Amino acid sequence: MKDAEPAIDIGRKFVRLIERRPDGFVEFEFAIGDPELYAELLLPAEAYDSFCRANGVTFLEPREGECAEEAEDWNWNLHQATQQRFR
């Protein structure tokens, strides 16, 4: 049986900046292979820069116009949870 190759390229890494906070921390999304499957991370600014260099990331554009429709009540991230109150 032939070994199946992964469906995604795990050599590709992505970062989407969420916020550079006044306290010196950087909130961002980090993904491997598929930019829509990500982990939210928080690092000091210097560590963030080192992390991006060490991983050779591709920087993604910020998310624009997140909808607030009823169907998306379950679609939120940690940044939103710390910035707003949920029903």
Image (tube, rainbow, N blue to C red):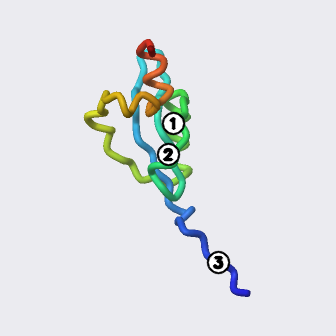
Disc 3 from disc 1: Cα separation: 34 Å
Q: Which residue is mark 3?
A: 4
Quadrant where the C terminus sits is: top left
Query: Of all residues shown, which one is farthest toward the front?
Result: 70
Name the residue furthest right: 1
Mark in the foreground, 3 or 2: 3
Element at badge 3? Answer: loop
- Residue at 49%, 24% (x, y): give it: 25
The answer for how far apart the CA atoms under marks 1 and 2 are is 6 Å
- In this view, the residue farthest toward the left is 65
On the image, the x and y values in percent for residue 13 come to 50, 54
Q: Regarding mark 2 in the picture, which secondary structure is present there? A: helix
Q: Where's the N terminus, which quadrant?
A: bottom right
Residue closest to the far bottom:
1
* Disc assigned to residue 48: 1
Mark drawn on residue 52: 2
First in sequence, mark 3 or 1: give its number: 3
Image location of residue 65, percent across then percent down: 26, 34
Tell me, for residue 82, which label it has, or none. Answer: none
Q: Amino acid at mark 3?
A: Ala
SS type, badge 1: helix
Residue at 46% x, 35% y: name it.
28
- Residue 21, quarter of the rendered image: top left
Instruction: Name the residue: 69% across, 80% down.
Output: 3
Return the residue nearer the eye: 20 or 6. 6
Pointer 1 and pointer 2: residues touching (CB < 8 Å)? yes
Alpha carbon distance from label 3 to label 2: 30 Å
Q: Position of residue 58 (x, y in %)?
A: 41, 53
